[in-house]
Amino acid sequence: MIRRLRRLSIPLKEPFPTATGVVAARELALLELEDDDGLVGYGEAAPLEHYDGVSLEEVIAALAAPGDGGPPQARAAEEMALLDLEGRREGRPLGEPGADAIAVNRTLPAGPPAEAAARAADGVRAGFACFKLKVGLPDDRERVAAVREALGPWPALRIDANGSWSVEQAMESISALAQFDLQLVEQPCATLEELAEVRRAVQVPIAADESIRTADDVRAAAAAGACDVVNVKLASSGGFSAAREALRAARREGLGAYLSSTLDGPWGIAAALQLASAEDVSLACGLATLELFDSPLAGALAAPHDGLLAVPQGPGLGVTLAPDSLAEAVVEELGERRAP
């Protein structure tokens, strides 16, 4: 089997601001496994250092010298590439058959209120029924108010502070913003203990995101009374299987769950869609982020339609690339070698 490793840089249409930083281009590592018959499986590693503390260099080093360790994003890429290759060999998708399409939210960056409202109004026209707005900045109230006005009373509105608030700030902010009919607040504070304290004090449901990576984290969140819902990501969980275990742990603990991405590429989005389908995830997932890319790779999967994303039916991940779309995103060839 031949292993190829590449560094990708995918520009965004516009810089994407959050409480933890601004992303102008998404850098990923892409692992390619080619068997002796010429079939190829792809796995992406999607760390985001200012968000999860994992650098792309760490992930590349782990993928260049594979072993049992490495960051979860590297493990996710290894597993994804193997599952993609196996699925292609057998002519089947990664996940078991389930829903043909998954409800998704439109993600709104923490930009100026008027810009966020305009994007929200565009999302309503496109048929989205759920929106997630980034918060954690001084003008949160103005931005949330503008978005709710643009949405009207019906679409669900989530806000996401990316763990940027203290307990006191979270209590004050959520109490002030609850008037805008929030479905939930995602990761208002950094730790499970802080989330639990906030949850006891507010009426809006709390979702844990950065605090959740593994099934053990889900069980710890439930034991602490930290949240009502968990947000699971394949990259930070360590792959398809680990994310599946986290979803199943949430179900056993009586917690709601959905999947989302940290501006993942099409391979990570495809894997998450197949997992959401196989595990019957009903809450809107944060997977409609390819539309933020200014790249042909954004067209590797079907665009959202009426707030739904079609589940790729395989084989493997079901990602089909135009001939030049990948080459345009490659900024560095990181080596090719024959693996046992």
Image (tube, rainbow, N blue to C red):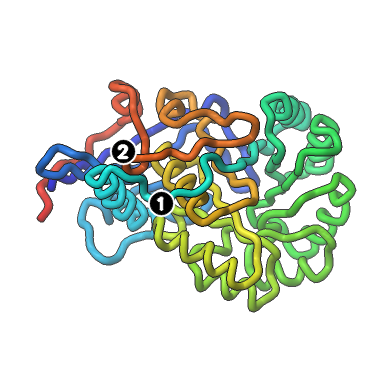
Disc marking residue 232: none
Q: Amino acid at mark 1?
A: Gly
Residue 27 visible? The answer is no
CA gap, disc 2 and disc 1 = 27 Å
> Residue at the location (53% across, 51% down)?
51
Q: Is residue 223 above or below residue 71?
A: below
Helix or strand or loop: what does disc 2 sit on?
Answer: strand
> Residue at the location (17% across, 42% down)?
34
Q: Residues within 10 Å of mark 2 (few under 14, many from 20)?
A: many
Quarter of the picture containing the C terminus is: bottom left
Provide residue 10's location: percent of width, then percent of height: 42, 31
Q: Quadrant of residue 193?
A: bottom right
Helix or strand or loop: what does disc 1 sit on?
Answer: loop
* Mark 2 vs 1, N-terminal side: 2
Q: Is residue 305 above or below residue 262?
A: above
Q: Is residue 55 above or below residue 265?
A: below
Q: Is residue 24 left or right of residue 143?
A: left
Provide residue 6's location: percent of width, then percent of height: 27, 38
Provide residue 299's location: percent of width, then percent of height: 44, 26
Residue 129 visible? The answer is yes
Question: Label 1: which residue?
Answer: 95
Q: Is residue 178 left or right of residue 192?
A: right
Q: Quadrant of residue 143?
A: top right
> Residue at the location (39% across, 54% down)?
73
Callout in the foreground (2, 1): 1
Question: Label 2: which residue?
Answer: 7
> Residue at the location (82% across, 54% down)?
173
Along the line of sight, which residue is nearer the eye, 279 or 76?
279
Along the line of sight, which residue is nearer the eye, 41 or 65?
41
Q: Is residue 127 above or below residue 173?
A: above
